[in-house]
Image (tube, helix red, strand yellow):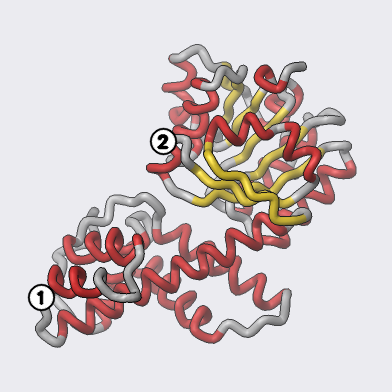
Amino acid sequence: MAQSRLRVGFIGIGAMGTPMTQNLLKAGFPLTVYDRVPARTAELAARGVHVASGCAEIAKSSDVVITMIGQVAEELEAVLGHGGVLEGAHPGLILIDTSTVGIAASKKMAAAARAKGVAFLDATVSGSVGPAREAKLGFMVGGDRAALDAVEPVFLAMGERIHHVGPNGAGSAMKMIINLMIGMTVLTVAETLTLGRQAGLDPHQMLEILSETAVSSPHLKNKGRMMIEHQFAPSFALKYMQKDFDLIMEAAHDLKTPLFASAIAHQVYTAANVAGYGDLDYASVVKFVESAAAMEMGDDKSA
């Protein structure tokens, strides 16, 4: 079968899965989709896309299955559970997990897939909703290089950069260190702006001056502006950053790697999630920092 006609199944039609599937359609791939919340597939169904009854059905009718699922337990259930992808899998199927599930879960799914004659790629994503809409995602892929080469056109329909970073688990490891850096950076911005405001500095001028220094970065400018304006419509929800720090600390434990400041950041994101900011963008961690400083900078937790 020609690569451009690979039958693609996609599981997880959420904030990221929706634009990813739309780009696969634009590229001409025959597509089948599934989400445990039926309403999420309604728009695709209206466009003539087949909506499967479950994960096993998708596996039976696809050459490639892609998962994009927010929570680790749900991803493992979709792949390994009753009625899951591997229950309906056939030898030669290629399973691509674009979710963020951590190193241990990726290796567990890879081993189970291998036993069924299925190639597994942990293909974690660099970029959020905006790049997903524009098909400008980056993929960090762990797994067999030949399997990656076979589905390269599928990746290129959704993104513009593909990095093969090693065996199974390496894609998840790369995602962990990226989100470690991002989460720490955004928390640093939150504390920096909060201290400056407490000292009486103008927040807009602070951001302008910081952006002219060696600490300038897209996260300083973009998330800093969100923090100053208290506008937290989510491109990446805080609850998912907290989940990623759970996975980061799990990896650190398994690899016997002490992460001192990261452990504190983990607690801050966890507390901010518990405090009610989980569904907002993770830049809303500034509201939690401000509340700890008894600042009256916002009136509620709405975006």
Disc with the residue nearer the chain's start (1 vs 2): 2
Which residue is under mark 2? 133
Residue 88, quarter of picture: top right
| Callout 1: SS | loop
* Type of amino acid at the residue the image marks with label 2: Arg
Horizontally, is 129 left or right of 163 in the view? Answer: left
Q: Quadrant of residue 95?
A: top right
Q: Is residue 150 left or right of residue 208?
A: right
Considering depth in this image, is 90 or 84 the residue closer to the camera?
Answer: 90
> Alpha carbon of mark 1 to alpha carbon of mark 2: how far?
35 Å
x then y, percent, for residue 247: 60, 66
| Point 77% across, 16% down: residue | 1
Percent coordinates x, y for residue 219 in the rendering: 35, 63
> Badge 1: how crowded within 10 Å, few (<14), some, or many (20+)?
few
Residue 202, numbered circle: 1
The residue positioned 56% from the left and 68% from the top of the image is 246
Q: Kindly identify the amino acid type of the residue bearing the numbered disc 1.
A: Asp
From what the image shows, is residue 125 above or below residue 23?
Answer: below
Residue 230 makes an appearance in the image: yes
